[in-house]
Amino acid sequence: MALYPSISASQQADAASSATTSPIKHVIVIVGENRTFDHVFGAYTPRHGQSVSNLLSKGIITQDGQPGPNFSVAAQYTADADNPKRFEMSPSGKKRYTVLPAPNTGFVATAPSDTSPPPFATLAAAQTAESAALFPQDIVHLTTGASGLPQQVPDTRFGANTFNLPNGPYQISRVGPDYDQYMNSPVHRFYQNWQQSDCNVSQATYDNPSGCRMDLFAWVETSVGAGTNGKTKPANFTDQTTGEGSTALGYYNVNSGDMPYFTELARKYTISDNYHQPVMGGTGANSIMIGTADALYYTDGNGNATTPPSDQIENPRPQAGTNNWYTQDGYSGGTYSNCSDPKQPGVGAIRHYLGTLPYHPDPNCAANTYYLLNNYNPGYNGDGTVNTSSAFTIPPSPVRTIADSLLAKNISWKYYGEGWKTFVSTPSTSVYCNICNPFLYETAIMTNPAIVSAHLQDTTDLYSDIAAGTLPAVSFVKPGGLLDGHPESSKFGLYEAFVHKIISAVQSKPALWASTAILITTDEGGGYYDSGYIQPVDFFGDGPRIPMIVVSQYSRGGRVVHQYSDHASIVKFIDRNWSLSPITSRSRDNLPNPVQLAGNPYVPVNSPAIGDLFDSFQFDRDRDDHRKDDDHGKDGGFGWSPF
């Protein structure tokens, strides 16, 4: 007879998941869409004794959203980039705008509709769509906020300011629309974001040693916008032709009542004012980094790097006779670059710039490999079949993810994506974000039906797991397209409401809340302006700062942390907390934690360096200190509204 009883597989998994280096036994990563730090927290004032780097602290704006004494620091410029032989990251011939181009309505809905929301025309339709993801009192905000204007015209909701915006960041809610409005979405693509950042070592300062001046946002919006798809430049071109204007310079003001729930969390827990999107550009590549801490590349479908079709290769060189109208770029155009070859379009400018930095970051580009830089569909459908629905699909990927590391150590994890069940059965009707799921690209995950069934689930399953006490050690949570906060198709208050319900559910379970950390961020900055320092880590980024709020009994105090971090920091936190090795030899979780100087805590002196988020917690404090004023979500969501 055995001396000890046998241990079941589930018991072994529970033991592995509980073996952590901190009191955190559960981490929940919630990812919204497309907002920079200054766009959200640009007017935030921290608790006494804390400091923050934002528009207000730099004197760019005043507390009431007016231009501040240092407003000119954020001034925007036009430029000349008319050489068809090269892409210019920091073009010459810059001239300061007198006033900004008028913001544009883009494709914001003119009126509510139940057939093409958002917003919905009736509360009943909104309730049918989202009753599981929101508290009842928040659903009404899915029916409000249409523009009342035609699409792709100057956004006259800004009133007299529409054509007379001062040259710098402007408060969205002060000049016309309030926080409960659907607003246009600026360009957020790879080469555009590098160019908007205007990085040049000749512009370097002590506070900004990378020399990224962030002063070409409006010009890139109006000169090329979201891409050309290889088409010729339209006739009679104006600063409104791309349908954006100066959308990128808008920000919200917490002092005017914007962002109420996230402001409450910031004042109670911890935020970072030095957390960054890991890749210049948009959702796809940045969401992938959350799972891989690396970039994906074009393959032959069997894991071997090969050359994509010519019309899928990026070419940001201006077309002949144009000022910055890219040759091949766009959602149905280029999205790959062979960044190992400086002669490839666009590549040379970025690699030359990296080479001029004093620490010479490795571009991290394998030879003859075309990396995904923007958004293409994942290689797999939700049912595990290969995705053949579009030519603009990245083939099945062999790149290892954090899921493989967790599986190898028998540590529990799930990716909860809102709309997963309908995505599997009827994807055309689903709010699910397929490009946001880093595991949907990977062959090792998607060709194993048992893994898919156990680990890729819906947000309704998240609430079931919280209620049943079966939440995994690591959870990734993604709202659907109506609630993710993406400009134009969602509102940031809806993302706040989505997050609020999850936090309330966790806090209603005291034992779970006692050992859980909730990390709230966005996938990327959405093309909005940000005034923070950017540390180039490799060819792909970093990009501008984005929000990061850390909610835990061990993150209490209304603290602002300054350690440099990006989405690879989430992976590094998981690595350290569960004693895992880096995902691969080239993934960013190999980078060291930053060494910071007291005089300038934002710039690592050991670049490239990425933090692991442990500085967001105070694990040496007694847990009762953290618990004494928690309400455990007893309000049930009532008494607060994001709008």
Image (spheres, rainbow, N blue to C red):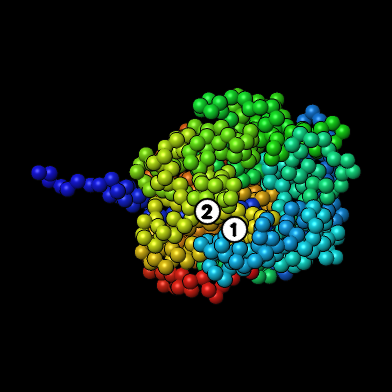
Q: Secondary structure at mark 2?
A: loop
Q: Is residue 434 visible?
A: yes
Q: Secondary structure at mark 1?
A: loop
How packed is label 1: few (under 14 Cα within 10 Å), some, or many (20 or more)?
A: many
Q: How many marks?
A: 2
How packed is label 2: few (under 14 Cα within 10 Å), some, or many (20 or more)?
A: many
Disc 2 residue type (three-letter): Glu
Name the spot of residue 87 as percent of width and height, x first: 76, 34
Asked whether the beta carbons under mark 2 and mark 1 sit within 8 Å of each other, the answer is yes
In the displayed structure, 517 sits above or below 544; it is below
> Is residue 231 rendered to the left or right of residue 643?
right
Label 1 sits on residue = 483
Disc 1 residue type (three-letter): Leu
In the displayed structure, 481 sits above or below 501; it is above
Give the residue displayed 57% in from the left and 65% down from the top: 127
Q: Nearer the viewer, residue 624 or 372?
A: 372
Q: Is residue 517 visible?
A: no
Quadrant of the rendering where the C terminus is positioned:
bottom right
Q: Which mark is residue 177?
A: none
Q: Which mark is residue 418?
A: 2
Name the spot of residue 259 as percent of width and height, x first: 62, 65
Give the residue displayed 51% in from the left and 28% down from the top: 303
Name the spot of residue 284 as percent of width and height, x first: 60, 43
In 3D space, how far apart are the residues under numbered discs 2 and 1 (Cα atoms)? 9 Å
